Structures are given as C-alpha cells and as structure tokens.
Image: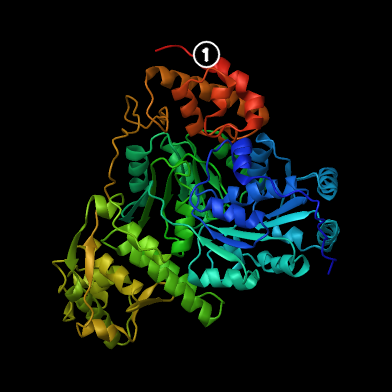
Amino acid sequence: MPAAPSLVPSQPLPADPSSILHEVFGYTAFRGQQQDIVDHVVAGGDALVLMPTGGGKSLCYQVPAIARHRAGRGVALVVSPLIALMHDQVGALEEAGVHASFLNSSLTSEDAQRIEREMMSGRLVMLYAAPERIATPRFLAQLDSLYERGLLSLFAIDEAHCVSQWGHDFREDYLSLNVLHERYPAVPRIALTATADDLTRADMIERLQLGEARVFISSFDRPNIRYSIVEKDNARAQLLRFIGDEHEGDAGIVYCQSRKKVDETAAWLVEEGVSALPYHAGLDAAVRKRNQDRFLREDSIVMVATVAFGMGIDKPDVRFVAHLDLPKNIEGYYQETGRAGRDGAAADAWMTYGLADVVNQRRMIDESPAGEEFKRGQRGKLDALLALAESHDCRRVRLLDYFGEPSQPCGNCDNCLSPPATWDATEAARKALSCIYRFHQNNGQRFGAGHLIDVLRGKVTDKVTQYRHESLSTFGIGADVAETQWRAVLRQLIALGYLRTEGEWNTLELTPTAREVLRGEVPMLLRRASDTPRSRGKGTRGKDTRGTTTGRTKERAPPIALDDAALARFGELKSWRAEVAREHNLPAFVVFHDATLAEMARAAPGTLDALSEISGVGTKKLEAYGKEILRVLAAAPAQ
C-alpha cells in the first residue's frame, strides 16, 4: 500500500463551494441536499448519494473536485461506465472553464499518454475513467504516485448501483472498486446513483466499503413526469397515436427488449414520418456513436433502443420515454423513465404491456442460470413492477413507496387524471383456474392462454373440436367476459404466482397456491383500462393531401412564458447557440440550456454585468460568449 500523503498545515483550505457554483456554473444557490453533500465531501467525508435523474448529482462531486483542486489537492477521479457520458461531461466542464479529460478506448495512444502526463502533473481537475481501466496495474501505479504526493483529491463513483448484483444493471468491473478505499484510505469517496431499493443500497455500502459514509437520500419524485401505462393492443398503433397526439416533433426514447425489435420499430417509425434512429449493442460502434451524437445534437430525434442506451444521457429536453416491452423491475423502469424531462419541463413516461410481457419476464427469470436466492429476489422485483402496471390507484404513490418514500396522489398520472373503472374478477379467476384443472384431468393436457380463453368464452375452433373441449363443464362459462378482460385476469394470476407458464409453447400450469383462488379466498379487483392517451392539446401529426404522414415538426415552446418580442429574441439566441455548438462539436445544451436562453430573452440584459446575473452564465462562458450574446439580443427584430 502506498504511503499516506502528508498534507502540510500551510495548504490553503478549499475554496467556498457557493462561489464556485456561481463562478463556474452560473447558479446562485444549491438545490435540495446539494449544499450538505458538497460541504461534507469538500471537508473530506465519504458519501453515498441517492438522487433522481435530473436532480443535479454531477454538481455533488464536480464542485468538491474543483474546490479541493484549488486547495492544491490534485485530481479527482470519476468512475464512469460509458464513453458517451465521459465525452459529454468533459465537454461541458471544459466549456465552463474546468480542466477535465477522460481515458478510454476512443483515444489514440499518443492522446492517452498526453492526458496521463496532465494527470500526473496535478494540473488536471477531473479525470473520467471506466472501472476496468482503474483496476489495471499500470493505472494503479499512477494513482499510487499521485497519492504519495498528496495529489489525489477525490474519488467519485457514478452509477454506483452497478456494483450490486441486486441492482438493475450489475457490472462485474465495479466489484474491483473496493481497491480505492483499501489502497487510498485518506481520499474521500462519493458514490452516486439515481435508483436503489433497500437491498441494493446495503449491497453498495458493503461492496464499496462505505460503512462509515454519510448517506444522502433525496426525494425520488419527478413531479414533471406524467406516468401512463396502457394494456397492449396493437402496440405500434398505440405508440404512433401517443407520439402524434402528444409529442409531435419532440425528442424521445422508445425502449424495446430485443435488438431485432429495435431495428424493426425504428425503420417503421421512419416510414410513418418520425425521425427515428436505432441503438443497441449489436450495431457497429461507429453507427452507434453517430446515432447517439445525432440524438444529442439535433432536435426532434426519437431514439429506439435496448437498455444498452441511455445511462448517463444528459440531454435535458427529452420530452418522452416510451416502453414497448415490460422492463425487468422498477429500478430499471425508473432509471429509464428518468431520462425524460431533465430540464424540469413537462414530460411523459408511457408504457404498453400485455400478457406476453409477463410470461416472457417470468420465463427469463426461471431459465436463468443464477442461484435460487437471486431468482427469488428478481421475482419479487418483477412482482412490484407488475403491481404498478396493474394498479388502479396513483402510479406515483406506488412508485415512490417502492423506494420507501411516502406521498399523496399526484394528480398527474393516468390513473389520477382519469380513474379507471374496476370490476370484481374473483369469480372469473376461479373459472379460469377450474378450466385449467379440467384440462389436466383430461390426460394431463396443457394449453396456452389463447385456447383457454376460447374454451371459457365458448368459441368453437378446430383445436376445441380436436380435443372435444366443447364437452367440458367449463366450456362457455365465461362468455360474458371480453377477451381483453380474460387476458387481464390471466396476466394478474401469473403476476401473483397462482399460474405459471411452462415450455416452448407457454402452456399454463396451476401452482400450489392456486387452491386459495379456487376456494374464493383471494379477492381480485381489476382495472378496465383504456389505451387512449390523455392529450395536452399539442395537436396531431401533419398529413399531406394523400393522407400520409409528413413528419412535419413543430417549433418547441420556450420553458417559460415569453411575449412576442422575447420570443423573437429566444429564436435568435437558439440560432446563435446552434452555430456555436456546431463549431465546438458539442450538443447545444452544453453551450447553454433552453432555460438559460429563455431567461436571457425575457430579461434582455444590455450589459455584461446584467448578463452575469442570469442563471447558468458562469465566468468562463461570460468571457467567451458575453459580447456575442449582447449583440444577438440587440439585433433581434422587435415584434
């Protein structure tokens, strides 16, 4: 183990975090728990931070890194799992005047060596690196040298849930990060994540050796996101209607379970006039990067992706996240939906799911090579997600309750806005299980959901005739229940563990607990769901004279109300920002967020001092762009 650094008493104290926040990032005050977290880490304490996506996690380690660097304590190492995230974060920091860089496989050997020299000199404020690089002997030797010279200021472990086998995105490389505490005990550590239930939190603390760390848990609520879950019935048509009615011309993400479905859905959306791109691990790396860059840099792109896409995506103006397939658990669902509305403006989390989704997720768990304890945990997580999907009360209350946060009905989810009708499905559930029991009595026959529903509804098909099921006592006993409602009953029975599916054909099997339902001991109140989205009145997709979709896009409204003159200034500022972003090869939001441009347009500052008071205008950006912004504002046409 390298010798601990000896920090001499004459070393200056870290700079005031509030002054850094204003000078570098242009903000006048911290939000929520940011101040307490920053002060704790600047003083040298370890921290575990749970904060929702868009809540400002990055500032919790960036401000302490800058403060400790200014006190002569060297470089902060930021552990990050994705190359794209590193690029965006470093680009934004450099724009703000903070010397930062990254080490990853996208660099040439010459560039990597140059960055290593910057790191070893202590001039670098922050270095982003992947966990697999950190564990290499060469990199650890470099950290040893920095540590012995007192030039390791901070370790920030982003997406820390990746260390837990109970988390939704376990990565084995994260397990090696305990070396940071064992080898460099005098360096403070901050681990951050947006999603973790109690089990995952405990795992993170144990595996990262954060037993002495202070735990900060912010509210998980994202009140600007509207949660809607609809029963799957022609999912493509439902998705197209949702995008057309609610999000014409908006940036969004559509998640699918398989790579094939991603490719097919993206191609279909393009045919329907939506600017869509695919993203999954099976694509060529250059194609993935090009598609991600377009998504970050252009407006109105819809990214169709597997869960391989999204972690660390900083794009603030994603207006919707749609799921065409059921995620594995609430943590994954929350992390993915949290990529919508990072700017605080209204956004949608929309999902369609059906019986096949439940069956597929159950099968994937059952067929996994993992141990039974792990499978049991995953079944419990899936059960919680299914309860959320099937609920007829407030979605947000259930979602927050999963993370241990009490709340009141939100008034901004589908169930709150349009409470669904419910029906007592207890007798229907008994009839379904009884029919399956009759199948088994008849020479052990097993059938899937489709045939079972045909028998229950008294539908004479070739298969019904072949197996003489019209003679069963259960034939036609459910003719008064619609097919969609029968599917809901079966979905709930599988979700609650009274039924399971078996084999390639997903035949239905009773479980030992099915007797409770058959005896009428389990009440089942189900929703009568509607798949009609609740419109915000944004209009419909454009149609040409032949009735085909044109893909016409709309001008996005500013995040605050502006009069006509201010709207004109806002438009001119956006055009100027686009030119700067192209010149610097950066996403537009890295230059300035829409909210900052809108405030400039509203206030119309005429001097640099007045411009410096706008939230989001730091010292470096004021120096770099201030005079140009004043010129654009002065030249904007009066309306």
Apparent side of residue 429 relative to residue 236 in the rendered image (left or right): left
In front: 450, or 486?
486
**Residue 53 placed where, x, y %?**
50, 51
Residue 575 vs 159, above or below: the answer is: above
Q: Amino acid at mark 1?
A: Ala
The mark tally for this picture is: 1
User: Quadrant where the C terminus lies?
Assistant: top left
Instruction: Name the residue located 54 percent from the left edge and 68 percent from the top edge.
Output: 201
Residue 200 vs 351, above or below: the answer is: below
In front: 123, or 14?
14
**Residue 407 placed where, x, y %?**
34, 60
Instruction: Name the residue located 38 percent from the left edge and 53 percent from the top edge.
Output: 351
Give the structural element (helix, strand or loop) at label 1. helix
Residue 215 vs 637, above or below: the answer is: below
In front: 497, or 402?
402
Residue 539 visible here? yes
Instruction: Name the residue located 61 percent from the left edge and 60 percent from the top edge.
Output: 191
The residue that disc 1 covers is: 634
Residue 527 vs 240, above or below: the answer is: below
Describe the colour scheme in one phrase.
Answer: rainbow
Quadrant of the image occupied by residue 207: bottom right
User: Quadrant where the N terminus lies?
Assistant: bottom right
Residue 81 visible here? no
- The local crowd at label 1, few if under 14, some if 14 to 19, many if 20 or more residues have their Cα within 10 Å, is some
In front: 20, or 211?
20
Instruction: Name the residue located 33 percent from the left edge and 47 percent from the top edge.
Output: 238
**Residue 581 placed where, x, y %?**
61, 29
Quadrant of the image occupied by residue 391: bottom left
**Residue 624 placed where, x, y %?**
66, 26
Apparent side of residue 462 relative to residue 160 in the rendered image (left or right): left
